[in-house]
Amino acid sequence: MIVPMKKITLLVSNRGCESALKKLRQAGVLHIEHFRPVAGDDTSSLEGKREEAARALDILHAWEEENRSQFHGKPEEAVKKILSLHKEKQNVENRIPQLEQSLTWYDTWGNISSGDISYLQQAGIFLKLYVCPKKEFKKLSHDSLVVSAKEKGNSVYAALLSYERQEALPFSEVGVPESRRQDIEGELARSKARLDEIAKELTGLTPCSSELIKYQKAIEKELEFNQVRNGMGKEERFSYLKGFCPQEKMSSFLGFIKRQPWAYTIEEVDDPQDAPMLIKSPRWIQNINPVSPFMGSVPG
C-alpha cells in the first residue's frame, strides 16, 4: 500500500544551519525538496571528484587479479595516480602506431632523414622524393638525375637529385620524417616497455578498490549534504527547508524535532503527486524481499 505523507517546513538560524542538517541526516526520516538551485562551487568540485573516483574504479576493474596485499595510501592520491597512468597509457598507445608508420617509411626509402637532406642542401645538392606511376616515370627527361629507389606494383619510388632548389618533378613530393630511424626504434622500444610498466603499476593499485568505493560513498554523502544546504530557502537571519515525512514515522519525528531549537509547521499534503511515494509491502512479501526502497531520505 502507499504510505501517506505529512509536509514539514523547518526554520533554523543561519548560524545553526549546518548543525541542523547534520542532525536531520542522522534522523533520516525526511525527503527534502529544494527551494533554490543546488549548484555551486562546492557541489561542482564534489561532482568532479565523484566522476574521477568512478573512472578510477572502472579502470582498476580491467586490471583486477587475485591480490591479497593491502593499500595504505590516501584514496584521493590513488585516484590521481590511476587517472594519470591511464591517460599516459592512452598517449603511449596512440604514439606507437605513429612510430611504426615512420619505420614503414624507412623500410621503403632507406635510412635517410631530414637531417641528411639539410646536410646535402648545405653542399648545394637538393634531394626530393616522389611516388609516381611507372609509365610516367619512363617518360621523364634524362637531363635530370632521377633514381628509382623501389618499385611496387605500378608505382615507382623515385629520388630527384639537383643543383637547383626550384627543380622538381610533376608529381606529389613525399615528406621526410624529422627523426632518424635509430631514434624512432629507440622511442618505440621505450614506449612498449613503458606500457608493461604501466600495466604492473595499475595491477599493483587494484587492492585499493574497496577504499575507493568507500571514498566514492563519502563523496556522495557530502555532495547530497551540500545540495540540501544549497537548496534551502534563505533570509537575512534564518534558513528554511521543506520535506515530507511518512505518517507512520511522525511520532518519532516529533519526539526528535521537539528537542531541537527550530520552528516548524506540519501540513497535510493536498495533492499526493506533490509528495514522494513510499510503498509498503505486505508482511508476507517483506519476508521474501526485506528491503523496501525509500527514495530521497536526507542523506545519512
Image (cartoon, rainbow, N blue to C red):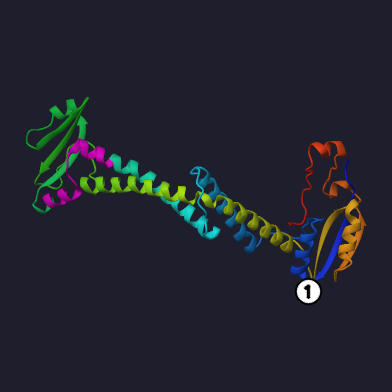
Q: Is residue 126 visible?
A: yes
Q: Quadrant of the C terminus?
A: bottom right
Residue 3 lies left or right of residue 63; in this view the side is right
Q: Is residue 221 left or right of residue 6?
A: left
Q: Position of residue 189 (x, y in %)?
A: 29, 45
Q: Quadrant of residue 107?
A: top left
Residue at the spot 76% in from the left edge and 69% down from the top edge: 19
Q: Give the residue type that dot 1 points to.
A: Glu
Q: How many marks?
A: 1
Q: Residue at horizontal 11%, vertical 36%?
A: 146
Main structural element of the magenta stretch: helix, strand or loop?
helix
Name the one closer to the observer, 184 or 67.
67
Is 115 inside the magenta-drawn segment? yes
Q: Secondary structure at mark 1?
A: loop
Q: Is residue 197 above or below residue 22?
A: above
- Of the pair 252 and 84, the residue shown nearer to us: 252
> 114 above or below 16?
above
Residue at the spot of label 1? 236
Image quarter in which the N terminus is found: top right
Position above or below: 24 against 186: below
The percent coordinates of residue 53 (x first, y second) are: 56, 53
Which residue is painted at 48% across and 52% down in the image?
A: 82
Badge 1 crowding class, 10 Å Cα cut-off, few under 14, some 14 to 19, many 20 or more, is few
Image x and y of residue 36, in percent: 75, 60
Q: Quadrant of residue 176?
A: top left
Q: Position of residue 90 (x, y in %)?
A: 42, 46
* Residue 86 visible: no
Among all residues in the image, which is located at the extreme left? 143
Q: Which residues are magenta?
A: 102-120
